[in-house]
Amino acid sequence: MTIFTKFDAQVIQEYVKLTDIEDDKDRWAKAKHNAENIFQEVYVPKVRSTPHPPKAWVHLEGRYDEYYQLKMQKHNLIWQTWIYMRTMVLT
């Protein structure tokens, strides 16, 4: 058996690329779909081509949508603080 970890990281990468989709739910759904395709087209063939391929595999994922939203909130807070501090220094 092979276990793929950090599948949620692939979903987040795909989410970031989908700037043309405004609705968050649609964007996460498309990101997950794209990540699944990449998993099937890139990673599964690599595992299957080994001398002793596994009979099964799983991929683990977390709650990427909540994680990413919290990460972006933190990023935005840091950015806003930096802008505020720079404004204070310049005035």
Image: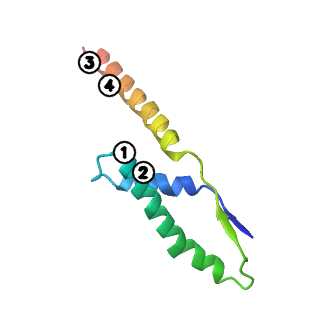
Report the mark closest to the observer, 4 or 1. Answer: 1
Q: CA distance from mark 4 to mark 3?
A: 11 Å
The residue that disc 1 covers is 24
Decide which of 54, 85 is in the foreground and name it. 54
Query: In this picture, is 4 found above or below 85?
Result: below
User: How crowded is the residue under tag 4: few (<14 C-alpha within 10 Å), some, or many (20+)?
Assistant: few
Report the mark closest to the observer, 1 or 3. Answer: 1
| CB within 8 Å, label 4 to label 1 | no
| CB within 8 Å, label 1 to label 2 | yes
The numbered mark, 2 or 3, whose residue comes first in the sequence reads 2
Residue plotted at (68% across, 82% down): 50
Q: Tell me the tag on residue 28.
A: 2
Q: CA distance from mark 2 to mark 3?
A: 40 Å
| CB within 8 Å, label 2 to label 3 | no
Q: Secondary structure at mark 2?
A: helix
| CB within 8 Å, label 2 to label 4 | no
Q: Tell me the tag on residue 90.
A: 3
| CB within 8 Å, label 1 to label 3 | no
The residue that disc 4 covers is 83
- The amino acid type found where label 3 is placed reads Leu
Residue 61 as seen in the image, left or right of residue 54: left
Residue plotted at (60% across, 55% down): 6
| CB within 8 Å, label 4 to label 3 | no
